[in-house]
Structure formats: structure tokens, C-alpha cells
Image (tube, helix red, strand yellow):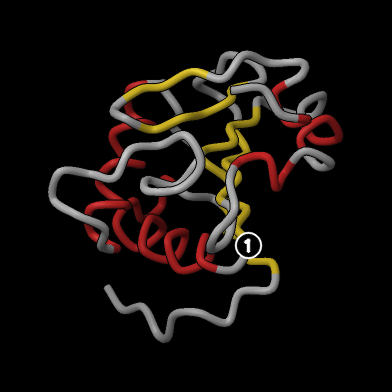
Amino acid sequence: MKSEATDSWDARTIHGVNYVLTSEPSLDSHTYVLLHGMGNSLAYWAGVLPLIAPQAPSLAVDIPGFGGSQVPDAGLSLETISSKLIAVLTSLGIKKPVLVAHSLGGLVALDLAHKMGRMVPRLIRVSSRLGGEVTR
């Protein structure tokens, strides 16, 4: 599936999650991870991806159950979505994800940051009022 977000990069699928990765992540630098909102897809980031890709490797994903990603066998829950995305990050060798999230993606990003701890150096939520206090 081609969209504006994937014109320069090929969309791929891993663990049932559709994604675009602009360049290979390196062990010593961060990778931007873009998480879209409810009812959207990675195409939401079409205008942003070309701007940040020259700065650092960037990954845009279709959150499980949206866009080109499959609904997990265990169903759609914050737990299954986060588990799938952690599997994707691990498989792609992304060690320092900077999470950039819109709307529903903000809730997912909060859960990822909670589960991944200090591996997440930054979390940026855009128009995301979802989620409350996250404790460790």
C-alpha cells in the first residue's frame, strides 16, 4: 500500500504491523517512532516524516488494528498493542525510541514508556489527552 508517507520509503510488515523505516537505526543514537491517532494510519505523518528523517532514523507504524496492520489474535487492548510494538522495536534493533504520538497514539506511547523505562529518552504527545497517571 503506497501513500504520501511511503513514496520515498517502502512499507513493510513485521509481527503483523505495517511500518515505514527511513534508515537503519544505530546503537548509539535515537530513532523517532511515530504513532498515529484513532482511525488514522502511518499516512498521518506524511508531512512530518520527510522533515525528521534527515535528522535521525524514523519509524512510522500502523498501530495494530489500524491501516495495514493486523488485529492481534488476542484482540485489541492496550496490552496487546504495546506488546506488538515492543516486538517490532526489538526486531528492528531500535534501542532508543523517541516516541512521537498523536491522540490514541499518546496513550500507547505512555504505556510503551512505562514498560520500556529508561530506554525511552523522550516522549512527545500531540493533541493527546488520553491516559492518566502512569506509575512504576
Viewed as shown, does residue 9 lie left or right of 66? right
What type is the residue that disc 1 sits on?
A: His
The answer to which of 59 and 45 lies nearer the viewer is 45
Name the residue furthest front: 1
The answer to which of 132 and 103 lies nearer the viewer is 103
In the rendering, at what x and y percent does residue 12 appear? 49, 18
In the rendering, at what x and y percent does residue 44 appear? 70, 47
Query: Could you say whether the residue bearing mark 1 is in a helix, strand or loop?
Result: strand
* Residue wearing tag 1: 102
The quadrant of the image that shows the C terminus is bottom left
The answer to which of 101 and 17 lies nearer the viewer is 17
Among the 4 quarters of the image, the one containing residue 85: top left
In the rendering, at what x and y percent does residue 48 appear? 80, 42
Task: Work out whether 34 lies above or below 92.
Answer: below
User: Which residue does the image show at 64% across and 15% down from the upper left?
Assistant: 23
The quadrant of the image that shows the N terminus is top right
Viewed as shown, does residue 49 lie left or right of 121? right
Q: How crowded is mark 1: few (under 14 residues within 10 Å), some or many (20 or more)?
A: many
User: Which residue does the image show at 65% across and 25% down from the upper left?
Assistant: 57
Viewed as shown, does residue 29 lie left or right of 69? right
